[in-house]
Amino acid sequence: MKDKKHPVIVVGSGAGGAMAAYVLTKAGHRVLMLEAGRNYDPKTETPMFKTNGEAPLMGAGNVDKDFGFYDATVDGGWSVPGEPYTTGEGSDFLWWRARMLGGRTNHWGRYSLRFSEHDFKGKSRDGLGADWPFEYEDLAPWYDKTEYLVGVCGTNTGLDDMPDSSDGILQPPPKPRVPELLIAAATKKLGIPTAPMHRAVLTRPKDDRQACFYATPCGHGCSIGAAFQTTTSLIPMAKATGNLDVITDAMVKNVTVDQQGKVTGVCYIDKQSNTETCLSANVVILAASACESARIMLNSKSKHHPSGLANSSGQLGRNIMDSTGTGLGAYIPALAGRPRYNEDGHTANHLFIPWWGHKAQEKGELDFPRGYHFEIGSGFGQPGSGVSSGLQGYGTALKQQVRDKYGSSVYLSLRGEMLPNEHCYMEIDDKVKDKWGIPVAKFHWKWSKHELNQVAHGLKTAKEILETMGATIDYPLPSAEKAILKGGQIIHEVGATRMGDSPKDSVTNQWGQTWDCDNLFVMDAGVFASNPHKNCTLTIMTLAMRNATWLSEQMNKGAL
Amino acid sequence: MTQKYQIKLSRRESLKWVGALSASTLIPNSVSALTMAAEKNTGQGHWPKLTLSPINAKGYGKDPNLLIPPKSPWPKTLTTEQLTLVAVLADIIVPREGTVPSGSEVGVPDVVDEWVSAPYSRQQHDRLTILSALTWIDDEAQLRFEQSFVNLTEQKRLQIIDDIAFEREDNDNAFMRIIPAFARFRSLVLAAFYSSPAGMKDIGYMGNVPIMGDYPGPTEEAMTHLEQVVKELGLTL
């Protein structure tokens, strides 16, 4: 395998890489996929039905397993041993990585909301950030195809923040639960909508994946394939074509170019033997995650690409955006001691609060330009290491307090759109290398007033919603500067290789093809021109499907 | 006379636990009455100054087996005396009620031991808080009744616990440090109890079972209750 020239090498096996490999192999192209982590099989490795009480520390998270013992993430999290990253002075940035086949799709929240024409044309509307180089109408059929293939449950709401899917695309959503219905009643009074969340969770069987049986948090992975992850869907489907080869434990170091600056292949470190191998390819697709792909490109300097591969625009590593994040929760006395039933559902939001402020922003009534949504934390969750606060005493009276408070708290998590700014970017730290000898990424970060004003508005609104439900919030809300989570902490980092209409201010064209190298593509969230508040994975997959289809056509025509 | 706490092998069975326990009498677990006397009369009550040997064990790493969790991810560090005190306190916090077992019956002391012995920052922080609380409680028993806490009568034990288990406006300054420390310990005991099968049943957790077909949503009883709540709040569904 190492001697021949590969038609296509895909770097990364997550949302973008697996979709690209699926589309290309289905179209008859041979693909070699390189994954920096180990092989992983959810069918045999997922801890289904395991209880917190069976896990060390009752499942609580720590530096080894940041999101708890059972979180699907392998060899990753906020830190990867031997693979550090650094931050500039005064910059807080967290970079979540997974080192496993399927990448972060194994544990993601599965929230799958479409971006809209409103989202794609922010700059035309308010002059900020960048427009995307296509219209919503161009992407709509690809959203349909992606949602259908992935399996997304939800409904068409007709709300301006939630573009409809075509008929027959969405699977039915699960019924809402009591705290969600109470929130819906409270927001209704405030003129704020709620809607069924769209999630990449099957409520009807599909291919060889089963429908959700409403137990085991999706973040643990899903052995029955109901919760979408590439390791139970796109990767096995691509393999079944006979056209896909996968090498795991292959940490890509750089992309190679010839004397004319044209891409010729990649070099990677085999983590098992700690040896370097270089492979040649006609086309290289980077889908290693927004910042990892940018790191590879920045580490691929050459005579023709002195500031990093395909960086004639100077935009490589710039324009990094995460989602904004904050939240507010409260005890809702009216929910105390409520009747018990199985409230696991599909283990995440059945209802959520989409952004309702487009018109207010149009009229200039809000002091921030971009929207947000609220996700809802509530329910009779499985007991674990956390215990409600404000308990008193001991014995039977204490136990009664615990039982009364169980399932009576509600938490509203804000997830909002941030705008790119000149202070949020990455570069290569020339002083630090990882254990494989690869120079590491260095991040710079600073929120602007757009994000802080948005977070302040979200906190105020959350307080209003909670108080409408009868909560008492008798303490001052934290300042937005204190309340906003760190850059990267929402794990929606995008934009480091953004697409655009012009090679002057973007790294790729609308097909994810780099302006400078026609046989180098980026198919992860790096190409996002903006970062709407709706979570990036569905759009990563949709773009990868569309752009890999275009690439396939170019290869068939002999253009590449 | 209180029986020594026997570790529960049923919670996550392992013979290694026994070995770890017998080798773990390293923690200085009490201060002498003399030391205490020297620290008394500060207006803040007594508070043990523990010098804990650092936990140098390794964590379970970034790729543990999730199907068969590590039985004994790190050596346990509580002494038999400390475990017995934890068991007595666990049963005050969560006593047996009819057929519902008590804290010690579902192995709470083992969970507390695993927690305070863990090599992670949050648990190391809790370790100082909880070992200080345990030491304080025994010191207090010695000061008040000249006996260790576990050897006190139920009534005398509760005299102490009644002073430290409630956060009140008029709490005595002498209990300023023990009240939050005891609250942390109590939370850990409650978590350990309610995450056990008996605890999950007691709290009324009904999930973690497969449902064939569509998720049924709230029961009729739950909806009737919600409708009442919504009405009382002046809202509409």
Image: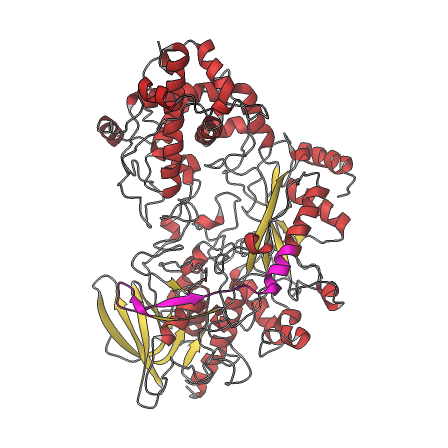
Please state, as top left, top right, bottom left or bottom right, where the N terminus of chain A lies in the image: bottom left
Residue A513 within the segment the image draws in magenta: no
Q: Nearer the viewer, residue A304 or A174?
A: A304
Say above or below: A549 vs B196. below
Q: Nearer the viewer, residue A215 or A12?
A: A12
Q: Would residue B150 be found to the left or right of residue B187 on screen?
A: left
Q: Quadrant of residue A432?
A: bottom left
The figure's colour scheme reads: secondary structure
Number of numbered callouts drawn: 0
Residue A431 within the segment the image draws in magenta: yes
Residue A273 at x, y = what percent?
20, 63
Q: Is residue B215 visible?
A: yes
Instruction: Work out which residue is located at the far bottom of the displayed protein and give it.
Output: A260
Residue at (41, 86) in percent of width and height = A560
Residue B119 at x, y = what percent?
32, 41
The residue segment tinted magenta is: A430-456
Residue at (62, 52) in percent of width and height = A173
Q: Would residue A357 be found to the left or right of residue A380 on screen?
A: right
Say above or below: A231 vs B3. below
Q: Is residue A289 visible?
A: no
Residue A372 at x, y = what percent?
63, 59
Say above or below: A436 vs B18. below
Q: Quadrant of residue A47?
A: top left
Q: Quadrant of residue A90?
A: bottom left
Q: Would residue A338 be found to the left or right of residue B13 on screen?
A: right
